[in-house]
Amino acid sequence: MANTRVIGLDIGTSAVRAAELEFGAGGPQGKNPPTLVRFGEVPVPLGAVRDGEVVQPESVANALRQLWSQAKFESKDVVLGVGNQRVLVRELEVPWMPVAQIKESLPYQVGEMLPMAVDDALLDFYPTGEVDSPSGRLARGMLVAAQRDTVTANVLAVEAAGLHPQMVDLNGFALMRALARGDLANATAAFVDIGATITTVVVASRGVPRLVRTLPSGGQHVTNALATARSISGPEAEAMKREIGIGFAVTPDRQDAADAVAHIARALVESIRNTFVYYAGNNPGAGIDVVVLSGGGSHLPGLGQYLSSASRLPVTLADPLAGLRTAKTARRDQLTGRESCVALPIGLAYGVAA
């Protein structure tokens, strides 16, 4: 089998990011590790993407054109990620049948489970296993139901930039694919991606997703709170946030700023911890072994230690580049210290090549 190149595209609130991976014979499961050929990132105007959904298509299309020009991607075919609170993910058991037939039957099986009309939803099924029951063989998996207009808005912005979406994938699954490798492939791990306005939590056991949840909070909310408390600009608040962090002593003249940061960060940590508690309550005896942080918001100083204390779990920073080869065209030096921000586009590229 010839080498295959795939570009994963993440449209975030603060930036668009794309990663191009090259897979050898055997794809992601082949004996040779994939190669990161190119990576690029371009900021998007404030308000162009709101909570994971494109609301200013032309602004996003312009950013994507700039991204393709700067990073010099040779293909316009992309795998697009989606994920916000308008995408429902929950466990589902249905009578066993081939996966293609399960997907075809979803509109008739899950209507009562959805907070939206079936006609307004895009439905998918991610198989995770099967089980024998008194009523017969059952297929077990994750139901994904996305508001159709949410996905359409993102697809149209991508197409307006002259790109061609080959597949739309869930950000949570992409996150798991990028990070559930090495020792984490055999653990029960909680992958937590903290973006600008959205935090994605995925609990996976031995590389199989068991829970996916999207929280409506992220690093930008911390910055906004600090900007308001101090009556300063967004860039000034962003810089001060990185200096103050959470859980560190500050001088009296910065106490109000520290309080603003802590108020939002602690609320986010509590939501993440509650997600872990929910998982534990529904999976007795199958506790989480480790928490893996990614995304720009994960770099807030002290956040990892605070989450570890709150959850009583070890917390580590993700490195989706571990185990990958890196081509010279990827400009690896520009990613030093920011490896965790590459997780979503890398995981999206993994998905279509699986």
Image (cartoon, helix red, strand yellow):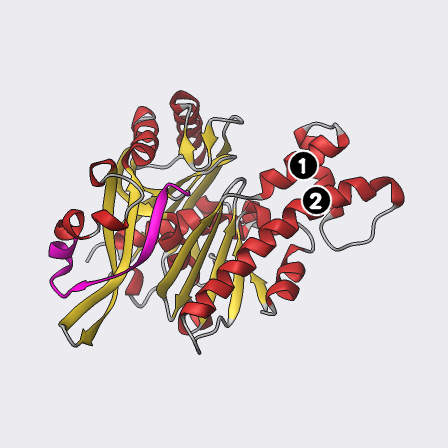
Please tell me which residue lies in front, 68 or 258: 258
> Which class describes the residues within 10 Å of circle 1: few (<14), some (14-19), or many (20+)?
many
Residue 327 visible within the image: no
Q: Residue 225 carries which label?
A: 1
Task: Pinpoint residue 2: horizontal percent, then vertical percent.
Answer: 21, 54
Task: Pinpoint residue 301: horizontal percent, then vertical percent.
Answer: 69, 52
Q: Which residue is drawn at 62% across and 60% down?
A: 307
Q: Which residue is drawn at 38% across and 48% down?
A: 171
- Looking at numbered disc 2 in the image, what kind of residue is underneath it? Val
- Residue 319 lies, with reference to residue 220, above or below; the image says below
Q: In this view, does 340 lie to the left or right of 175?
A: right
* Residue lying farthest to the front in this orientation: 112
Task: Pinpoint residue 125: horizontal percent, then vertical percent.
Answer: 23, 54
Q: Is residue 102 left or right of residue 34?
A: left
Q: Residue at x 66, y 30 (%)?
A: 234
Q: Distance between the residues labelled 1 and 2?
A: 7 Å
| Image marks 1 and 2: residues in contact by CB distance under 8 Å | yes
Asked which quadrant contains residue 317, the reply is bottom right
Please tell me which residue lies in front, 76 or 103: 103
Q: In terms of sequence position, does the residue under pointer 1 or pointer 2 come before the other?
A: 1
Asked which quadrant contains residue 304, the reply is bottom right
Q: In which quarter of the image is the C terminus?
A: bottom left
Magenta region includes residue 88:
yes
> Which class describes the residues within 10 Å of circle 2: few (<14), some (14-19), or many (20+)?
many
Which stretch appears magenta? 85-103
Location of mark 2 (residue): 261
Magenta region includes residue 46:
no
